[in-house]
Amino acid sequence: MNKQFIKIIIILMGISMLTAKPYRGGELRTINTYRYGRYEVRMKSAQGSGVVSSFFTYRDYWADGYTSSQHWNEIDLEWLGNHDDKVQTNLIIQNAWDLPELIDIDINPHEDFHTYAFEWTPNSIAFFVDEEMIRWVDNFYADSMYHYQKIMMNIWQSTNTDWVGQFDSDILPVYAFYDWVKYHAYVPGSGNTGTDNNFIQLWEDNFDFYDTARWTKATHTWNGNNADFIHDNVVFQSGYMILCLTTPSNTGYSGEPLSIETNNVPLTFSLGNAYPNPFNNNVVLPISLQEPGDVHYSIYDIRGHLISSGVNKFLDKGKNNIRWNGTNQDGKLVSAGTYFLRVSNKDASITKKIVYLK
C-alpha cells in the first residue's frame, strides 16, 4: 500500500478520535412526518445527574435542505435525570424558544413506567401525564407550530450543568425504557379518544421488533451534547425499545433481562390480514365477530387525513368481510400510497396498514 495513503488514513483516524464525543447515546426517529394529532408514549426515563431522556416531534429541516433555524419546529417532553418529580415541556418555533420552568408531577418518572402525551391542534398544544393535563398552550407558539415533523426519542448527556446538573461517568451505563408509542390523528368532531374525542388512533408500535418501515436509528450529535448517537445503543428486547447512554467501550444494553407485560383484554372482534395487500382494485379485510352489531371503519392516509368512512351492520356473528375500492368520500380514486384502515365497535378498535398501487 502507498505510504502516503497510509499516512493520510492515520491522520484521518486521529482527527476522528479527537472530534468524537466521550460518550455514546441513542436516538430513534420515524421515517415519515406527521402533523396535528395526539402523540403518546409509555416509558421509564433514565436516572442520573446530567442525563436527558426524551419524547418529542421535530422538523428535520436539515434533511429538507434548509440550514437556518428559522425553519425549526419542535414539541418536547424531556426528563432530567437529576429530578425525580418533574418533567420539562418545550416549544420551539422559527428562532423562538418557549422554555418554561420544570413542571412538578406526582410521580417519579425514573422508577416506573408512566404514560405521557401531547395533543397538537391548529390552535393549541396540551401536555399530559397519566391522562392528567399538566400544561395548555394557546398562544403565538401554538399558532406558529405548523410544519410536519418526525416522532423522536433519544438519550444524551448535556454539557449544560445549570440545566441538568453535574455528570459523573461512573453512573454509566444508564437506560431509558419505552414500552409503546401511539399516534392519533386529529379529526375534530369524529374521533373516539383524547380531549373532546377529537382524535383517532392510526397506529401503535409495541416494539416487539425493530420496524424498519416505520423507524430509523440516528447517527449524529450537536454542540452541547457529550454523546454521539450510535445504532448499537438503540436496542429492541422483550417487547421494549431501550435507549442506552454508555461509554464507547461498553455499548448496547447490559442490564437485567426484561419480562414482557401482558394485557388480557377480551375483544368482541378480530381482524385477519388484508388481501391482496398491496392492492390495485379492491382490498378485503376479514373480520370475525363474537357477537352481531355495528362495525365502523375509517381510512386515513399516512398524514392522518380522513379519506373514507362508513358503517357495516353485521346481523350475525362469525366471519365477515370489509371491502374498500380505493376511493375517497367523493367516490374519486385516491393516490397510490400507504393507508390505514381503522375498524372499531363499541368495545375496541384495531388498525391495519394497507398499500394501494395504481
Image (cartoon, helix red, strand yellow):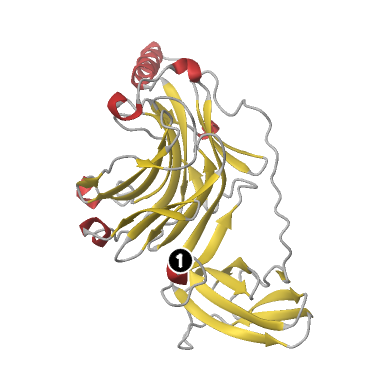
Q: Position of residue 149 (x, y in %)?
A: 37, 55
Q: Position of residue 264 (x, y in %)?
A: 73, 56
Quarter of the rendering containing residue 136: bottom left
From this view, report whether residue 152 is shown above or below residue 332: above
Work out which residue is located at the far front of the displayed protein and give it: 106
User: Which residue lies at the image location 59% right of the left edge and 29% below the top edge?
Assistant: 253
User: Which residue lies at the image location 38% right of the left edge and 61% below the top edge?
Assistant: 35
User: Which residue lies at the image location 29% right of the left edge and 61% below the top edge?
Assistant: 146
* Residue 69 as seen in the image, left or right of residue 111: left
Q: Position of residue 287 (x, y in %)?
A: 72, 75
Q: Depth check: give the residue in front, 286 or 138.
A: 138
Quarter of the rendering containing residue 83: top left
* Residue 121 as seen in the image, left or right of residue 261: left
Question: In terms of secondary structure, where does tag 1 sit?
Answer: strand
From this view, report whether residue 207 is shown above or below residue 80: below
Q: How many marks?
A: 1
Q: Amino acid at mark 1?
A: Ala
* Residue 139 as seen in the image, left or right of residue 240: left
Work out which residue is located at the far right of the displayed protein and give it: 318
* Residue 298 as seen in the image, left or right of residue 101: right
Q: Residues within 10 Å of mark 1 (few under 14, many from 20)?
A: many
Q: Depth check: give the residue in front, 269 or 60.
A: 269
User: Which residue lies at the image location 44% right of the left edge and 70% below the top edge?
Assistant: 196
Q: Is residue 148 visible?
A: no
State the residue position of label 1: 185
Q: Is residue 181 visible?
A: yes
From this view, report whether residue 22 is shown above or below residue 281: above
Q: Position of residue 76 (x, y in %)?
A: 36, 46
